[in-house]
Image (tube, rainbow, N blue to C red):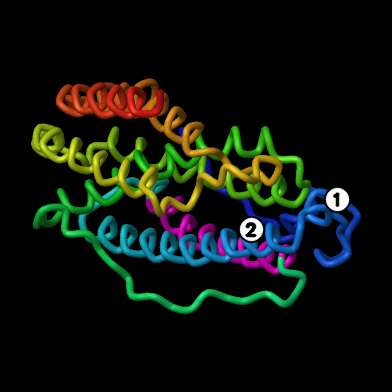
Amino acid sequence: MLLRKKRTGKTQWWQRAAPKARTLEEIVDPVIDATPAEGRAELAGIWQNRARLELRVASTFSSIAVELLEHGATQNVYEIVTQAARDEVQHALISAELAAKYRGDALVWPDPEPNHIPTFRQSKGAMHATLYILTECCINETIACALLEPSIAQAKSRLAKAALTTILSDEIEHARVGWAHLASPWVTPEIKRELPSFLQWLHSSNHHDLLGDEAPLPREKYPTHGMLSRRQARDIVHTTLVDVILPGYRRAGIDPSETEAWARTVFARELAAAV
């Protein structure tokens, strides 16, 4: 069951690291302080880029909300999708603030970017809206949650851990809202019969974006800052797909057999290449 989110606005994300702190600047983080200047600059760049990506996701949720309002969803789905756009703006702020902490200077807000709405092979109407929320929530946000949990577990930087934990608390609900929509009457039996023809393509694109050479998450040199290695990320993505996402499709009445076969092939190939 999806619950409405209650926002008090009283607690800052960095207070997870230092509950009595009055400003981010006054918080001492020994792991960050012990990192050489070159490493701090690289980590600042990673978080600054994440701020840009989080704003892009805010734009995505805004677009999803518009399509769902046009084609239909339950009240809870509307509420959480619209809240998700605000959450992602907050995630951008968290990322930019942490980047500034690594740099040791002022916050830099990301520049605006065009809003790219995927065509999903020229799909239209309710099908496009379904593919949009499925891609962002059932795939992207579900995998994001799986990646964030071990990132938090291995982080020794108190501020990196606080940032990642705060982001995860929202991403869990962002993932759940996609599955809630798939299970709702607004995703008709006709749409569910068509969805399998899109799934392998969607997952293949996601796999390339997440684990390709320019993927933003794995940074092998900085495990104590919550950065996963490429191998960790690959294994987590595989496990999440097989154990969470594909069974989730089946529970929603969507046949993922072709995507399952693709997953076995691609991950076996990658595992062999890594040996």
Image coordinates of residue 275 in percent, x first then y, are 40, 23
Snapshot quadrant of residue 91: bottom right
Say which element carries label 1.
helix
Depth check: give the residue in front, 2 or 272.
272
* 143 shown above or below 75: above
The label number, if any, that marks residue 59 in the structure image: none
Q: Is residue 180 left or right of residue 24?
A: left
For label 2, the residue is 43
Tag 2: residue type? Leu
Tag 1: residue type? Pro
Say which element carries label 2.
helix
Distance of label 1 from label 2 (alpha carbons): 15 Å
The residue range painted magenta reads: 78-102
The label number, if any, that marks residue 30 in the structure image: 1
Depth check: give the residue in front, 112 or 187.
112
Near mark 1 (Cα within 10 A), the count class, few <14, some 14-19 or many ≥20, is few
Magenta stretch secondary structure, dominant: helix
Image coordinates of residue 192 in percent, x first then y, are 15, 34
Q: Is residue 261 left or right of residue 173?
A: left
